[in-house]
Image: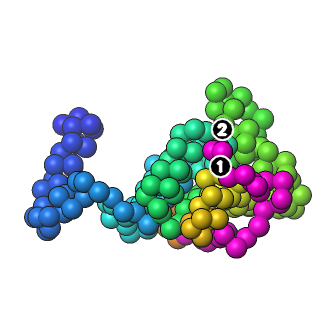
Amino acid sequence: MTPYEQLLQNNDDWSREQIKQDPEFFSRLANVQHPEFLWIGCSDSRVPADKITGTQPGEIFVHRNIANMVVHTDLNLLAVLEYAVVHLKVEHVIVCGHYNCGGVKAAMTSHNFGIINKWIRNIKDVYRIHRSEIEIYMDETERLNKLVELNVREQVLNLAKTSIIQKAWKKNHRPMLHGWVYGLDDGRINPICKMSHEDHLDPLYEFDDLVKED
């Protein structure tokens, strides 16, 4: 059996087991979803949102990219965010990074990674802004993990800068924004920060006319 055939066999086994345990499982999920959470996570295969949070299908809406970034020109991310906030009416948006992140590590170097350079340049900006906080650490791993945490904070802030979130905060007082970091070595989530409609941005980023979209 080839590796991809094994995946199909695993799916068949899983489907049969779900129906065996709960005959109505798929019929309940087929026509509607009401997730409470939007998860913006890293594409790293070791950080599956449902596994590490113990959530079931239908409970968490997921977007993943390299180094869990919220980039204001990323229409994919913005479309997911608007759908989750406006249409699914999620109560929480979670940005979850992970320690020893390869994308963050790449951004700390001067290596040429081709097209990836354009993406991780956003992380380099986070490094530049917080250089003094990072370079107090002598150990390379400690510097890396500090940047991982700071990057998560910046991505939560980037969420708050969008008109999507600001509209929802003004109209519905939701969602709560969370910044988490997952530990690959122990499987534990470290809450780093959170923001709500009661928090304020630098006025430069606050919209006074929320009719226009991002």
Q: Which residue is mark 2?
A: 73
Query: Which circle, 1 or 2, is nearer the viewer?
Result: 1
- Coloration mode: rainbow
Does residue 210 show up magenta in the picture? yes
User: Left of 199 or right of it: where is 189?
Assistant: left
The answer to whether residue 182 is seen in the rendering is no
Q: Quadrant of the C terminus?
A: top right
Q: CA distance from mark 1 to mark 2?
A: 19 Å
| Helix, strand or loop: magenta stretch | loop
Residue located 61% across and 39% down the image: 74
Q: Nearer the viewer, residue 55 or 79?
A: 79
Q: Mark 2 belongs to which amino acid?
A: Thr
| Residue at 25% across, 43% down | 7
Identify which residue, 116 or 76, lies in the foreground.
76
Quick one: label 1 or label 2, which is nearer the N terminus? 2
Q: Position of residue 35 (x, y in %)?
A: 40, 63
The residue indicated by pointer 1 is 211
| Part of the protein shown in magenta | 189-214
- Viewport quadrant of the N terminus: top left
Q: Nearer the viewer, residue 178 or 207?
A: 207
Label 1, residues with CA under 10 Å away: few <14, some 14-19, many ≥20: few
> Which quadrant of the view contains residue 25?
bottom left
